Image: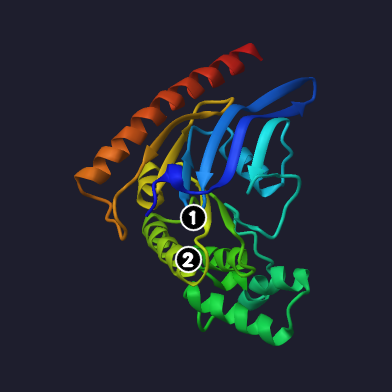
């Protein structure tokens, strides 16, 4: 694999700033954020609660506007959502009145540029990819949490986006299911990659173990207003285990950076509460 410096830049932020206006005051969510994510990279962003992780992901998706600075995808400014980006939400965000097949079909139906026959074939391919064969006609209320996120992942991938954005997608799952889904996401990412250009992934999580297991690089964000404090390479070959000296060493490095920012965030929150 080429070194990161030699690979094409897919997502680039320069002096990025995001401000939310709340009643009589402003909240600076992101300040002076610089990041350079390479094509085909699996990047994971960690940081304390409220540091702007999800806000940054929403800006990449085009759901939130940039206040100041520059955010580029393939060298072009992000102005709105687009089909080159698939999004998996923390909440399952499935339509309860639609079946598994119906939920996954949605992006293709909205696009309207594919025949019914091809649409059905493509949807079935992704149902098979995420391991939901036999559940095509099941409704969301009959599915487990892990199965619901498999539907969300298939829906995000079905129109073959260049970039996959995931906002703490496994946060609500139990520990065992979460571990299985981490392994499954790695498999799906690698399998999809083998059939097309390598997809660029940006994944948000609070779990350091999850970050090190999944990432090519882990980006640690500071306490609010968020910026990139540290970047840690994860060079452990895949498939990975959750143990081993290298895994533990990288995990501790990420954890040390993160703990400093969590303490800062706690002090900041304490000060803001006492000021009210």
Q: Which picture quadrant has residue 28? A: top right
Nearest the eye: 83 or 20: 83
* Alpha-carbon span between mark 2 and mark 1: 8 Å
Q: Residue furthest front?
A: 6
From where the camera sits, is residue 246 visible? yes
Q: Quadrant of the N terminus?
A: bottom left
Query: Does residue 50 show up?
Result: no
Q: Earlier in the sequence, mark 2 or mark 1?
A: 1
Which label is found at residue 193?
2
Q: Which residue is mark 1?
A: 40
> Residue 254 shows which numbered tag?
none
Q: Position of residue 67 (x, y in %)?
A: 73, 31
Residue 246, image x, y percentages = 23, 44
> Quick check: 118 above or below 188?
below
The answer to which quarter of the image holds residue 225 is: top right
Judge the density around disc 1: few (<14), some (14-19), many (≥20) Cα neighbours within 10 Å: many
Q: In this image, 152 relative to 117: left or right?
A: left
Give the quadrant of the C terminus.
top right
Within-10-Å neighbours for mark 2: few <14, some 14–19, many 20+: some
* Contact (Cβ within 8 Å) of mark 2 with mark 1: yes
Pick the residue in front: 145 or 76: 76
């Amino acid at each position: 694999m080429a070194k990161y410096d030699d690979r094409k830049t897919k997502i680039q932020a320069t002096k990025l700033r995001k401000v939310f206006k709340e009643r009589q005051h402003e909240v600076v969510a992101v300040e002076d954020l610089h990041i350079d994510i390479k094509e085909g990279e699996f990047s994971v962003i960690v940081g304390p609660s409220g540091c702007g992780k999800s806000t940054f992901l929403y800006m990449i998706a085009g759901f939130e506007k940039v206040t100041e600075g520059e955010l580029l995808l393939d060298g072009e400014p992000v102005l709105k959502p687009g089909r080159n980006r698939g999004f998996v939400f923390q909440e399952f965000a499935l339509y309860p009145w639609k079946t598994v097949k119906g939920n996954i079909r949605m992006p293709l139906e909205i696009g309207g540029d594919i025949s019914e026959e091809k649409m059905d074939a493509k949807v079935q391919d992704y149902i098979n990819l995420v391991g939901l064969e036999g559940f095509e006609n099941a409704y969301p209320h009959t599915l487990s949490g892990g199965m619901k996120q498999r539907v969300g992942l298939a829906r995000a991938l079905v129109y073959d986006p260049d970039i996959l954005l995931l906002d703490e997608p496994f946060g609500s799952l139990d520990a065992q299911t979460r571990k299985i889904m981490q392994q499954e996401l790695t498999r799906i990412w690698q399998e999809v990659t083998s059939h097309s250009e390598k997809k660029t992934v940006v994944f948000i999580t609070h779990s350091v173990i999850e970050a090190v297991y999944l990432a090519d690089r882990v980006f640690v964000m500071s306490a609010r207003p968020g910026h990139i404090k540290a970047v840690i390479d994860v060079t452990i070959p895949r498939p990975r285990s959750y143990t081993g000296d290298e895994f533990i060493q990288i995990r501790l490095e990420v954890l040390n950076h993160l703990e400093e920012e969590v303490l800062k965030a706690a002090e900041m929150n304490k000060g803001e509460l006492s000021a009210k």
